[in-house]
Amino acid sequence: MREVLKSVQTRETELGRLVAGSTEEVFAWLTDRIKQSAQERATSMGVGLSGGSTPKAWYQWLVEGRHFDSKALRNVIWAASDERQVSLESEDSNLGNALRGFLNPLGFSPDKSVAWSVDYEPESAALAFQSQWMHRFGENQGFHLCLLGMGEDGHTASLFPGSPLLREPVEQLFAAVAVAGRGWRFTITPTGLEASNEIILLATGAAKGEVLARALRTARPVIELPIRLLAGYADRVTILCDRAAADALR
Ligand code: 6PG
């Protein structure tokens, strides 16, 4: 591991392995992990990028330091682990933000990303994404590496408290769901997380640390605190925390 990672701290938790460090260490850890996974895979690797504002700082860091080489990562196919049904041009588009944030500036070719369609009804668009994904990567393959964010209500991807996708087992790996007050969202489902090889949650700032602390200290059901889903895949989960989040977790 590179020099910058020397003070990263790790510990096992019920939700997965916690890795804590400075903002730069956390970004470097995530970057190295993607590079290493891509190198280890002889064939294409599907990465689900998380949404919201948290990854934007990482995108900026990636571009400023030119930390990704698009040629070395040419076997990576990028998608969003959840998305609003808006065009890629919209500032609300998670994949659009990744394209603007680092994929385009670092020279990744447009055929290296897969978007949810805005041309179909939400449920058909989710099925279309799923069949496109499976056609490329095989039946029942989620993301090889799935990045997730987390909200202060404990949601992750677009799995919000009370979500119908958390109430009953769903067969789909990727689904459309109407979220009260937020419109239609596309999201990886719990089945999709189960079908993903590795899951990385990026949590920065004290408020996220407090949510994680709550998720680790209570046995509240997943339907109330969706981030607790991670306990089901803990052996494949890394929770990446910056110092502010890690301090709130003590
Ligand atoms: C989205 C995602 C959501 C997000 C978290 C964290 O907004 O696209 O649905 O799960 O990753 O809410 O968002 P912030 O990074 O903005 O706090």
Image: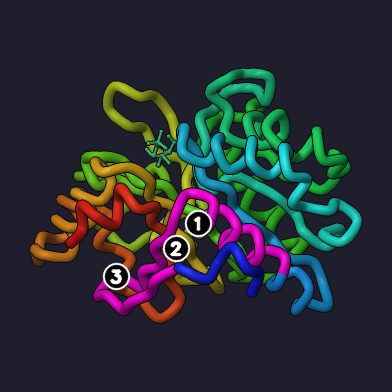
In the rendered image, residue 80, in percent from the top left (x then y), is placed at: 59, 44
Q: Nearer the viewer, mark 1 or mark 3?
A: 1
Residue type at the position of mark 3 = Leu
Would you say 22 lies left or right of 224 here?
right
* Residue in view at x 53 percent, y 41 percent: 55
Distance of mark 2 from mark 1, alpha carbons?
34 Å
Which circle's residue, 2 or 1, is located before the other in the chain?
1
Residue under numbered circle 2: 171
* Residue in view at x 43 percent, y 29 percent: 184
Would you say 73 lies left or right of 211 here?
right
Residue under numbered circle 1: 26
Q: Nearer the viewer, residue 89 or 24?
A: 24
Q: Is residue 133 magenta?
A: no
The answer to whether residue 207 of the structure is visible from this angle is yes
Q: Which residue ends up furthest to the top in the rendered image?
A: 90
Residue type at the position of mark 2 = Glu
Residue under numbered circle 3: 15
